Amino acid sequence: MTSDGVPQRTGNNLDPWYANYAERAAGLAASEVRALFAVASRPEVVSLAGGMPFVSALPQDLIISSMDRVMRTDGPTALQYGSGQGVPALREHILEVMSLEGIQGSVDNVVTATGSQQALDLVAKLFIDPGDVILAESPSYVGALGVFRSYQANVVHVAMDEDGLIPEALRQTIAHLRGQGRRIKFLYTIPNFHNPAGVTLSAERRPEILEICRTNEILVLEDNPYGLLHFDEPAPNALRSLDPEGVIYLGSFSKTLAPGFRVGWALAPHAIREKLILAAESAILSPSSFSQLVVSEYLSTTDWRAQIDTFRGVYRERKDAMIEALGEHLPQLSWTNPKGGFYVWVTMPDVLDSKQMLPRAVKELVAYTPGTAFFADGRGRHAMRLSFCYPTPDAIRVGIRRLATVVNGELDL
Ligand code: PMP
């Protein structure tokens, strides 16, 4: 206490309010990716670290005219608060987009959000009590791990291979956790063109994974921002298409259109969607009317499927450049060869540590994301994620050559 009876703050020197934070704030630690963005954004660095879509491939003029039309025809609505569930016309378009992956749903059960990241946060808020177990692939999306940590969940990773999550590993993990009396709230999975692993859950495994979750009363949270960005064959139908009552599906316009709109969505079982809307209203009142109307107008008036084809072509060329360069310059490493999406997962010999190696890489003007960012349990030291979405094919080749210099230097070759 001070002399006037006011409690003395017991913070540290850096943050005088340290002692006042809620316990869950401890889960809000800066990720490796975040720290990296600052370094890797220097123009001379080839960044294979971030997951930024190549928005320059978009038709800017069509986006401008969509914005213009929205403001001229529906300006007051675009500038106003809107429904917590989202703009109905956009939700109709979202059903159309999801139908490409075999999903049939009702507009009533679509909730738009400020990016699928916010939908992830809302689902976590609804379901996670401190200490609950969330199952996730091994590795998993860094942004989801951050959300789960902030709600004080324990993430337990389940093994995957080149065909995605391994059903037998899921069965064993659940049995083991149940044996310990732990509460499992949901399975978080990215079935298509996985971030960061670059693999896709095979069509054969999909019903099996769902059956395991159903019999164990575990909800499935299917996160599918990359699903339409396949290079050859389309991805198998969404998990949600096979089990509408057991799956919350998350989608996004960030990768098929642009992340700057911050428009994503959740398609939830009917019973859950009401809670989801209430949670959304409490968090943000309503998602941006302006963004939703512009995206809706763009989808109504342009050939958005052709635009997604353009993106596929761009990313495919970049992926090919990366795989080819890895084969040429880093044959001592192994990597996944994705059939879509943005990412390649590279595994290195045990003597190499991707986190320790990063400063050396940045000195050589190349950046990547160390594998440890994608695990909740400290694994991933001998792996890294390389993104091919943003740099040009030539820059990718330069970047991989620089990475080879770093790896060979570490190996003393
Ligand atoms: N899930 C995954 C797997 C992602 O890779 C991302 C973006 N990197 C998101 C969700 C969030 O995307 P957004 O909020 O832009 O829709």
Image (cartoon, rainbow, N blue to C red):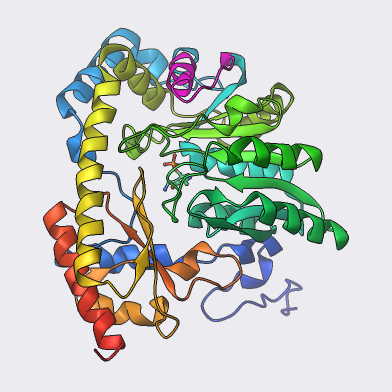
Q: Is residue 324 left or right of residue 359?
A: left
Query: Which range is magenta?
Result: 91-107
Q: Is residue 61 left or right of residue 292?
A: left
The quarter of the image that holds ligand 1 is top left
Q: How many marks?
A: 0
Give the percent coordinates (x, y) of residue 360.
27, 82
Q: Quadrant of residue 214?
A: top right
Give the percent coordinates (x, y) of residue 408.
25, 83
Query: Please, which residue is most extreme toward the top here?
Result: 73
Task: Determine if the magenta segment contains residue 104.
Answer: yes
> In percent of the image, x 49 and y 57: which residue is there?
142
Q: Is residue 282 visible?
A: no
Front residue of this view, candidates 224 and 340:
340
Q: Quadrant of residue 111?
A: top right
Q: Quadrant of the C terminus?
A: bottom left
Give the percent coordinates (x, y) of residue 76.
38, 14
Query: Please, which residue is most extreme toward the bottom here?
Result: 412
Q: Is residue 392 left or right of residue 312?
A: left
> In percent of the image, x 58 and y 17: which residue is there?
105
